[in-house]
Amino acid sequence: MIWLVLAYFFHTTGELCISPVGLSMVTKLAPLRLGSLMMGVWFLVNFVGNTLAGYIGAFTEHMGEYGWMISLAADFGVRAEHAGLLGVFGGLAVDAARVQLRPVDYLRDASWHGCTARKKVTS
């Protein structure tokens, strides 16, 4: 029971720390006339993310009952009762590897999104 209370505590504390920072970032980076709209989009993205997390949680609750997941877990030497965890963390590992392996040249060049802070000004 204590783990559930601690999980809610840390989740709520993290949300209380990130939400004001995110809203501040949105208001600073958005154009003046679109500030309110972008704040609404911030909350909409939070809604979509939390809804998606609920669907993923509902799916992974019963993931260990699927035959293909149990056989995949057996191939990796994981017990059948931990097959759902293999699906969740295996998916996260594949996604992290995908992000690490893609080319990131566009992150080095700030001109693709109109940022002029890194461009050299020639006069």
Image (cartoon, rainbow, N blue to C red):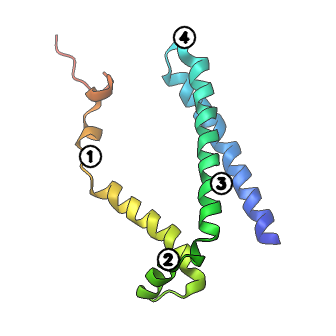
Q: Identify the residue position indicated by label 3 in the image.
A: 54
Q: Identify the residue position indicated by label 4 in the image.
A: 33
In the picture provided, is 119 more to the left or to the right than 59? left
Q: Identify the residue position indicated by label 2 in the image.
A: 69
Nearer the observer, 64 or 79: 64
In the picture provided, is 117 more to the left or to the right than 18? left
Q: CA distance from mark 2 to mark 3?
A: 20 Å
Q: Is 107 situated above or below 33?
A: below
Image point (64%, 33%), residue name: 43
Q: Which mark is residue 104?
A: 1
Q: If the image is split into quadrants, where does the N terminus sit?
A: bottom right
* Label 4 secondary element: helix
Q: Is 31 situated above or below 9?
A: above
Q: Nearer the viewer, mark 3 or mark 4?
A: 3
Q: Nearer the viewer, mark 2 or mark 3?
A: 2
Q: CA distance from mark 1 to mark 3?
A: 31 Å
Image point (50%, 86%), residue name: 78
Find out whether the residues at labels 4 and 1 contact each other: C-beta distance under 8 Å: no
Q: x, y percentage for residue 115?
A: 33, 24
Q: CA distance from mark 3 to mark 4?
A: 34 Å
Find out whether the residues at labels 2 and 4 contact each other: C-beta distance under 8 Å: no
> Badge 2: few (under 14), some or many (20 or more) residues near its Cα, within 10 Å?
some
User: In the current view of this chain or complex, which residue is farthest to the front?
Assistant: 67
> First in sequence: mark 4 or mark 1?
4
Q: CA distance from mark 1 to mark 2?
A: 33 Å
> First in sequence: mark 1 or mark 2?
2
Q: Nearer the viewer, mark 1 or mark 3?
A: 3
> First in sequence: mark 2 or mark 4?
4
Q: Toward which corner of the image does residue 111 lie, by quadrant?
A: top left
Q: x, y percentage for residue 33?
A: 54, 10
> First in sequence: mark 1 or mark 3?
3
